[in-house]
Image (cartoon, grey):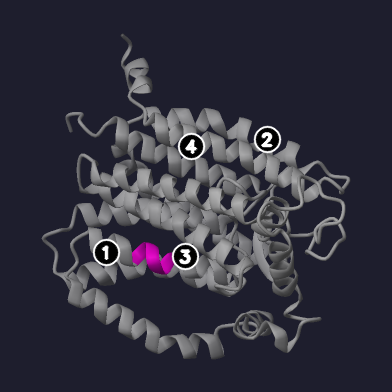
């Protein structure tokens, strides 16, 4: 049997099946959120998925240890993309985060974090003998450069994602716990300074609105208030697919981002508590399978990669769903496999491809 074919049959089929199921459900969810609009967002999402699937299988079937050679070039490319965004980027929703590439737009911050995970994994897996303080400083430099450029855009959501990813990878990379606790204490102490000096007025308003959405229900609190109304009105079983009397169909949910940031609000309204619960259970199983890949990895590199990717996608999921139910501030993070977005589909499928590679080559010789 050809080696690549043998690798194909060793794929994590449960993880692949659940990923494919959530991708298909995402197309359905996007259609249910945008059916009253002229542009066919569901069709566009399907096209992006079909374009990215060949990349997924190619990366999945190649030994994940290729990242030792590809991580730094990809990291440099992402930094160049962030620099280009600072000068040539397209401004959307208050942030200059997008590069217009003609037929498509791309968000370099999403590439930067996956490149950062690859680079951190390579560094931490090869520096166990290095003093802990020096390892932390080097990791801080790896993360700090793209983080500052993303903060300048400003993209608060993408900045937040880096924090749990870095801490989890340092933990798996065997950095002593006392250093991690010290980092957390310092980080918490710096939060007021970041909030006061580092946030734009609209970002500060998002935080105050999160704490008290009733303070400005017709202004900054409108989106979260309408999201809570939509989810609450779904009741136990929801109003049904493409319900004409829904908050979404009547235009109360923000049409510009309902298929991205507030996709869970639409699902909660149309399918109720039961539908939302089933989706959460599907994500729970997905993350348990991803953690299983990390625990069964062949080496430190595989464990670090799988951990970083799992925490990245978990944070996206927690923050996205959390902001629709007023559990977290509105940060603009998409819901993995569900929300609309070509560049995010590409990064998400690349992440799952790396997980598949770690699983396939977990018992292969180095």
Label 3 vs 1, first from the N-terminus: 3
**SS under mark 2:** helix
Residue at which label 2 appears:
46
**SS under mark 1:** helix
Q: Residue at x 76, y 50 (%)?
A: 33
State yes or no: discs 2 and 4 in contact (Cβ < 8 Å). no
CA gap, disc 4 to disc 3?
A: 23 Å
Residue at which label 1 appears:
170
Label 4 vs 1, first from the N-terminus: 4
The residue range painted magenta reads: 162-166
Indicate the position of residue 226 as horizontal and vertical percent values: 75, 70
Label 4 vs 3, first from the N-terminus: 4
Q: Residue at x 50, y 38 (%)?
A: 19
In the picture, the disc for residue 161 is: 3
Q: Looking at the rendering, in which quadrant would you find the C terminus? A: top left
State yes or no: discs 3 and 1 in contact (Cβ < 8 Å). no
- Asked if residue 189 is among those painted magenta in the image, a careful observer would answer no
Label 4, residues with CA under 10 Å away: few <14, some 14-19, many ≥20: some
CA gap, disc 3 to disc 1?
A: 15 Å
**SS under mark 4:** helix
Label 3, residues with CA under 10 Å away: few <14, some 14-19, many ≥20: many
Label 2 vs 4, first from the N-terminus: 4
Q: Is residue 125 left or right of residue 80?
A: left
**Residue 93 in sight in this render:** no
Q: Residue at x 58, y 39 (%)?
A: 23
Up the image or down, 128 lies above or below 209; here it is above
Label 1 vs 2, first from the N-terminus: 2
Residue at which label 4 appears:
18
């Amino acid at each position: 049997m050809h080696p690549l074919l043998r690798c194909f049959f060793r794929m994590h089929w449960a993880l692949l099946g659940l990923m494919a199921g959530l991708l298909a459900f995402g197309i359905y969810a996007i259609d249910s959120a945008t059916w009253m609009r002229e542009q066919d967002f569901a069709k566009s999402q399907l096209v992006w998925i079909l374009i990215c699937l060949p990349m997924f299988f190619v990366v999945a079937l190649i030994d994940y240890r290729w990242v030792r050679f590809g991580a730094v070039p990809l990291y440099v490319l992402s930094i160049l993309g962030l620099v280009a965004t600072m000068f040539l980027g397209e401004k959307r929703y208050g942030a200059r985060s997008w590069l217009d590439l003609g037929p498509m737009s791309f968000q370099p911050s999403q590439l930067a974090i996956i490149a950062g995970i690859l680079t951190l994994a390579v560094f931490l897996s090869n520096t166990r003998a290095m003093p802990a303080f020096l390892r932390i400083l080097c990791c801080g430099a790896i993360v700090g450069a793209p983080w500052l450029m993303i903060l300048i855009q400003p993209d608060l959501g993408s900045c937040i994602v880096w924090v749990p990813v870095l801490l989890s990878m340092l933990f798996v990379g065997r950095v002593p716990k006392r250093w991690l606790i010290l980092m957390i204490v310092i980080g918490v102490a710096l939060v007021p300074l970041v909030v006061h000096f580092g946030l734009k007025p609209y970002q500060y308003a998002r935080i105050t609105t999160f704490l008290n959405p009733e303070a400005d229900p017709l202004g900054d609190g409108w989106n979260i208030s309408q999201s809570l109304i939509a989810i609450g009105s779904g009741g136990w079983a929801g109003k049904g697919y493409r319900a004409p009397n829904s908050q979404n169909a009547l235009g109360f949910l923000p049409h510009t981002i309902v298929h991205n940031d507030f996709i869970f609000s639409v699902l909660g309204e149309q399918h109720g508590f039961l539908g939302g619960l089933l989706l959460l259970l599907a994500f729970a199983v997905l993350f348990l399978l991803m953690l299983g890949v990390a625990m069964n990895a062949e080496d430190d590199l595989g464990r670090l990669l799988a951990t970083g990717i799992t925490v990245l996608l978990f944070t996206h999921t927690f923050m996205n769903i959390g902001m629709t139910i007023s559990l977290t501030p509105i940060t603009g993070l998409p819901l993995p496999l569900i929300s609309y977005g070509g560049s995010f589909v590409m990064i998400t499928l690349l992440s799952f491809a790396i997980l598949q590679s770690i699983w396939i080559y977990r018992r292969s010789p180095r």
